[in-house]
Image (cartoon, rainbow, N blue to C red):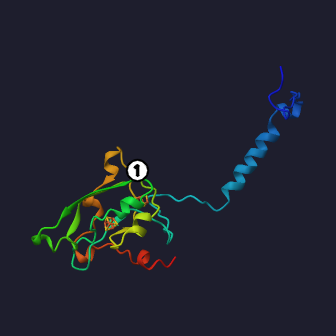
């Protein structure tokens, strides 16, 4: 039969000598490699007891920010969803009622805002696209593991930061973009 390629080589089965058939050199060589790694600096950490410091450019779970008065900054313009390459963001806009001025900064707000964390690739383009400085990727919080797919769709109950000024999420490092 014609070979498929001109690089084909005939491999001969070499007969092993007694020393090779005892496999001792191979075993000793393998053990030496294992021993060498025992004394090397470990690159793994014992998570979750031990946590690595996050890099300054690290992008974690999103937060929807409030302004200084506690009103949601997001105006449901949809630019973040448009910029998202993973199509992970879904929202429904609604019109603010006069009595809701303290809740939403603009006349239009996101009645529903969801991010599918399984689709998200944490690229940060939503943050860059937002004209209202409403969405940021936190540098201190990871998206936790779950047992199903549904809990990975994060709604406003998870994404919007607390109203309490003492519990606001600090995103000053990302705002300054010092990296
Ligand atoms: S970080 Fe990237 S992938 Fe994730 S929601 Fe924002 S734009 Fe989409
Ligand atoms: S988070 Fe920003 S970009 Fe996205 S809808 Fe709200 S205001 Fe627009």
* Ligand 2 in which quarter: bottom left
The answer to which image quadrant residue 149 occupies is top left
- Label 1 near ligand 1 (CB < 8 Å): no
* Residue drawn at 15 percent across, 74 percent down: 101
Between 104 and 56, the one lying in front of the other is 104
Do we see residue 139 in this rendering?
no
The answer to which image quadrant residue 141 occupies is bottom left
Q: How many marks?
A: 1
Find residue 163 and report its horizontal and vertical position in percent.
22, 72
Between 151 and 4, the one lying in front of the other is 4
Q: Is residue 178 above or below residue 140?
A: below
Q: Which residue is mark 1?
A: 118
**Along the horizontal axis of the image, is 5 left or right of 51?**
right
Which image quarter holds the N terminus?
Answer: top right
Q: Is residue 30 above or below residue 75?
A: above
Between 41 and 179, the one lying in front of the other is 179
* Residue drawn at 44 percent across, 58 percent down: 48
**Along the horizontal axis of the image, is 168 left or right of 34?**
left
């Amino acid at each position: 039969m014609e070979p498929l390629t001109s690089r084909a080589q005939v491999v001969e089965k070499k007969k092993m000598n007694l020393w090779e058939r005892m496999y001792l050199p191979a075993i000793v060589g393998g053990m030496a490699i294992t021993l060498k790694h025992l004394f090397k600096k470990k690159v793994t950490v014992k998570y979750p007891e031990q946590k690595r410091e996050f890099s300054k450019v690290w992008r974690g779970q999103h937060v929807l920010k409030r302004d200084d008065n506690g009103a949601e900054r997001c105006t449901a313009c949809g630019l973040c969803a448009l910029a998202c390459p993973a199509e992970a963001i879904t929202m429904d806009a609604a019109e603010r009622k006069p009595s809701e001025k303290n809740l939403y900064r603009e006349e239009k707000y996101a009645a529903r805002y969801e991010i599918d964390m399984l689709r998200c690739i944490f690229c940060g383009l939503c943050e860059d696209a937002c004209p209202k400085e409403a969405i940021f990727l936190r540098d201190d919080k990871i998206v936790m593991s779950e047992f199903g797919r549904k809990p990975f769709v994060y709604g406003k109950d998870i994404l919007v930061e607390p109203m309490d000024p003492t519990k606001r999420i600090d995103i000053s490092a990302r705002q300054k973009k010092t990296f």
